[in-house]
Amino acid sequence: MSLPQVVSRQEWLDARKALLTREKELTRARDALNVDRRRLPMVHVEKEYVFDGPDGKATLLDLFGGRRQLMVVHFMFNPEWTDGCPSCSASAEERSPGLYQHLATRETTLVHVSRAPLHKIEDYKRRKAWTFPWYSSHGSDFNYDYGVTMDDSVAPVEYNYKTLDEHRKAGTDYYFSGEQPSEQPGLSCFLRDGDTVFHTYSQYGRGGEQVGGSYYYLDLTALGRQEDWEEPKGRADVPRGASPDFAE
């Protein structure tokens, strides 16, 4: 691996300022995308999903824990496996207790859901010394309905909003390699209005790589960051909760 070129301080400063311009463009583009994401319509979740958790049976509404929003990490864990997906495990390791606490202060609950039966989840969780909420969707349609379990004997397979034929044309049909049923990663967001639950957003594939700290997670939700700050003059399109960098 080659190292960066060695230059004078002034040459470095010129290059850094040029890069900063591009970074600001990306920041503003991301903020604008977050605005459009919050404007997405939502779908009433009418099906009654039941999960297995450490405290017994739980509905999708129960997973909110009384908060306004729910984020579900679709953790790849096939019922036939002994261990969870290594990549999903690596991501789970990076979610600190502080992240869950920060999301909770914004009325948002983050949980993991896998298709493996609860006893396998609990065993793997114990071996990993994890304490975050993790539920089993074993025996329900949840993973199929939210596009993370591929099984054409249950429903026509698609992933990241593309059919198998569309993935073949795009050269991304590796998502469908291997035997079915197969598991894929994803993250889904839900909003609660009283006892009524709405699906607001789901992302798949490399979309998970865009998630960092709590603000990045909140940017995926319908309510956003939920912070009040003075709206920049002339930018009525910027809702409260967007990054202050929008003002630059």
Image: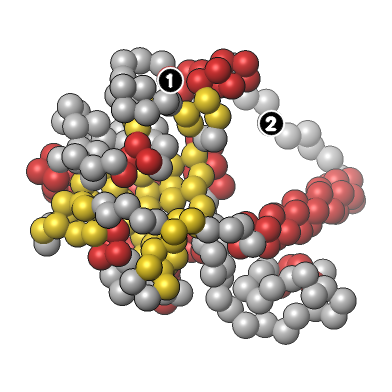
Name which residue lies at 59% across and 21% down.
166
Q: Looking at the image, is 29 positioned above or below residue 100?
A: above
Neighbour tally class for label 2: few under 14, some 14-19, many 20 plus, Cα within 10 Å: few
> Which residue in the structure is indicated by mark 2?
3
Q: Is residue 101 visible?
A: no
Foreground residue, 29 or 116? 116
- Residue 235 in the image, given as x and y percentages of width and height: 82, 73
Helix, strand or loop at disc 1?
helix
Earlier residue among tags 2 and 1: 2
- In the rendered structure, find residue 176 and report the number of the disc placed on it: 1
Foreground residue, 248 or 56? 56
Q: From the viewer's perspective, is the residue at label 2 or at label 1 nearer?
A: 1
Left or right position of 218 against 152: right
- Disc 1 marks a residue whose amino acid type is Phe
Helix, strand or loop at disc 2?
loop
Name which residue lies at 43% across and 20% down.
176
- Residue 64 in the image, given as x and y percentages of width and height: 32, 66
- Residue 191 in the image, given as x and y percentages of width and height: 44, 65
Neighbour tally class for label 1: few under 14, some 14-19, many 20 plus, Cα within 10 Å: many
Left or right position of 23 against 52: right
Q: Looking at the image, is 95 positioned above or below residue 185?
A: below
| Residue 35, quarter of the rendered image | bottom right
Q: Is residue 79 visible?
A: yes
The quarter of the rendered structure image containing the C terminus is: bottom right
Name which residue lies at 39% across and 32% down.
184
Left or right position of 127 against 94: left
- Disc 2 marks a residue whose amino acid type is Leu
| Residue contact between numbered discs 2 and 1, judged by CB atoms under 8 Å | no
